[in-house]
Amino acid sequence: MADNDQLNEEYQFSDLDAIGTDTIDQAERGYEASQRRTAESSTNIKRNALIVVVLVILAMIIYKFLGSFFAAPKIPAQKALPEKTTVAQPSPPPQVKAVTPVVPAPVVQPTIPANVEQKLSALELSQQSLRSEVLSVGNQLGGISSNVNELTAQIAKLNNALMALNDRLEEQSREIERLMIRTKPKKTPVVIKKPVPVKKYYIQAVIPGRAWLISQNGTTLTVREGTVIPGYGTVKVIDPLQGRITTSSGQIIRFSQDDS
């Protein structure tokens, strides 16, 4: 009986040893898995917190840039404090007898501060106003371009009209020149007449109302008042007392010096 009791006790101890070894292995594996989950959750929380901080800094930089661009009153930007995140503490090593599962800590969603939201909404409003201004300026430019096109077309029409008028003026000028050439009086040839030598008469004899004249070549001529003498004109006055004959040309016929 004593031997049987000893064998039973040894068997029970060996069973307890096997059960204890298996339990310890399972506990160690559970602990390692919980440690990995805890590390992964803490890494995700840190990454999310870093992303939130970067987004806040970028929003502040964009707001400052746009504020300086539109000459808006500068508002001192508040430093965005990184959101406090709760890091899950690793659970204590499980007891050998009881393995408690480790529940991962809930991931805290990042929240944007109220002032940052206000600044972002103000930026959106300013962007909307800028879009409307850009649209209005674009419409004005379109109207100006259409007006410029109309003016260009009108200027082209005026240039064509001026060119047509210039052509007509040149044609009229040529026609006037042709007419002036046609109506220009022709130059009559100047005939130079040689002076015909006038016979010079002298009184040969004179009586009241009649006179006898003699030329240089010896021809004689009887004249009365009203007789026409070639080169002298008409006899006006016969003055026997003075011994001269006055003609219409103003010339006076006298006695020859040889007769005096």
Image: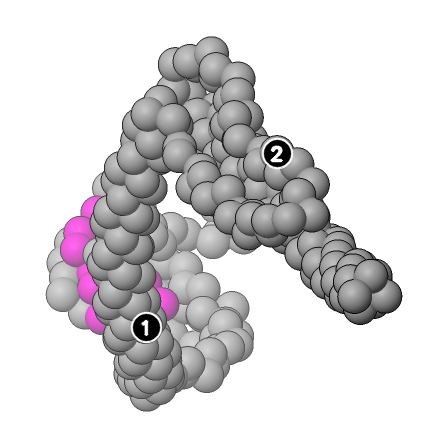
Circle 1: element type = helix
Residue pictured at 66% horizontal, 36% vertical: 92
Real-space CA distance between mark 1 and mark 2, rounded to the nearest whole angstrom: 86 Å
Residue pictured at 21% horizontal, 64% vertical: 234
Membership of 230 in magenta stretch: yes
Disc 1 marks a residue whose amino acid type is Ala
Report x, y in % for residue 180: 32, 79
Residue pictured at 64% horizontal, 48% vertical: 97
Checking the image for residue 186, the label placed there is none
Checking the image for residue 156, the label placed there is 1
Decide: is 28 above or below 185: above
Depth check: 157 or 259 in front? Answer: 157
Report x, y in % for residue 244: 30, 48
Depth check: 122 or 85 in front? Answer: 85
Labelled pair 1, 2 in contact (Cβ < 8 Å): no
Chain part drawn in magenta: 228-239
> Is residue 170 visible in the rendered structure shown here?
yes
Badge 1: how crowded within 10 Å, few (<14), some, or many (20+)? few
Depth check: 5 or 65 in front? Answer: 5
Q: Is residue 23 left or right of residue 226?
A: right
Circle 2: element type = loop
Of callouts 1 and 2, the N-terminal one: 2
Q: Is residue 36 left or right of residue 130?
A: right
Residue pictured at 36% horizontal, 68% vertical: 231
Q: Which residue is mark 2?
A: 89
Disc 2 marks a residue whose amino acid type is Gln
Farthest residue toward the front? 1
Magenta-highlighted stretch: main secondary structure?
A: strand
